[in-house]
Image (spheres, helix red, strand yellow):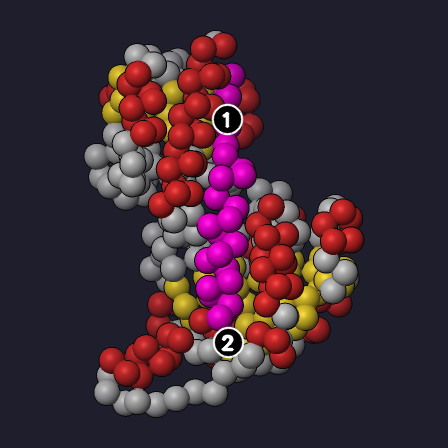
Amino acid sequence: MKILTTTSSFGRADRSPVDLLTAAGCEVQDNPHGRTLTEDEVAELLHRHKPDGIIAGVEPLTRAVLADAAAHLKVVSRCGTGLDNVDLDAARAHAIQVLNTPEAPAEAVAELTIGLVFALLRNLAFHNHSVRSGQWSKKMGFLLSETTVGIAGLGRVGRRVGTFLDMLGAKIVACDVHPDHAWLAAHPRVTLVDIGELLPAADLVTLHLPSAAKEMHHFMNATRIAHMKPGSYLVNTSRGALIDEAALTAALDSGHLAGAALDVFEHEPYQGVLINQPNVILSPHAGSYARATRVRMEIEASQNLLTTLSEK
């Protein structure tokens, strides 16, 4: 079997996932660019190597890409949770099975979220720049225990974030269309509200929502951002397309929002206007980039691929 790995760093942290594939008799071709592939690049690699399966990252697996590869491609095994970069309708039409690893990255993404929350509340980016530039300026921050955090989405990551925040003493409001009532019962200090109540109540809002559904695109639009508490913060480690970047930029420029921290973007690698915003912390979609998590994701994606190909 021929396998193409299109993630930017497959097997870099640990060779176990590669060894797993080769031990099963697979011929493995790596992403030669060492970064997120463009649509043209992934199409060219699929055309050149004609793999039976791919272990995918966040590169665009569009209708055109999948149609061109349909004669040989049987499985897309996503190393990660989100499937927004895969045209699922096209995959179904060409009988290409699409898999993901939803549990593996949840802990790492939740931990990064907590790190970004503290970074915003305690102005870490500003203080780092202050010391490096020789200014030694300080900006007063906030204690987490005096902060109301709004969690939009109580899925795998959102619940972990809520557990961390609850342990750390934050006041928490949360919303979810299908909440886990057992988890809520175990966390009685978490108040379940709708999004209309959450936004004006929270000093900081963190997003943990899927964006594959059309109605979730730009979920945080100008109207919802305007409903956020003046001087509040926005964190997104979920999906880039959840936020209308123009609306976020306008809210930061006006001072309505005090800051934001983003690990995901609608277009990646990110080169947009938020790069010039001093009160925005930017991270290169690194939520799952913890060694143990990365290895677990890659092994799980490899096992999913092998199991599914063996059934074809």
Residue 122 in picture, x, y percent from top left: 46, 78
The relative height of residue 110 versus residue 222 in the rendered view (above or below) is above
Q: Is residue 68 left or right of residue 252?
A: left
Q: Looking at the image, is 25 positioned above or below residue 20? A: above
Q: In which quadrant of the rendered view does residue 50 lie?
A: top left
Residue 307, given in percent of the width and then of the height, sits at 47, 17
Q: Earlier in the sequence, mark 2 or mark 1?
A: 1
Mark 2 residue type: Leu
Query: Looking at the figure, which quarter contains the N terminus?
Result: top left
Magenta span has 16? no
Front disc: 2 or 1: 2
Which residue range is magenta in the image? 94-118
Q: Which residue is mark 1?
A: 98
For the point 39% across and 52% down, the residue is 286
Q: Can you say whether 22 is above or below 40 in the image?
A: above
**Does residue 111 belong to the magenta stretch?**
yes
Q: Secondary structure at mark 2?
A: helix
Q: Is residue 266 visible?
A: no
Closer to the camera, 127 or 223?
127
Residue 121 tag number: 2
Q: Secondary structure at mark 1?
A: strand
- Rendered position, 187 above or below 95: below
Q: Which mark identifies residue 32?
A: none
Q: CA gap, disc 2 to disc 1?
A: 39 Å
Confirm whether residue 279 shows in the render: yes
The residue closer to the viewer here, 84 or 187, is: 187
Q: Residues within 10 Å of mark 2 (few under 14, many from 20)?
A: many
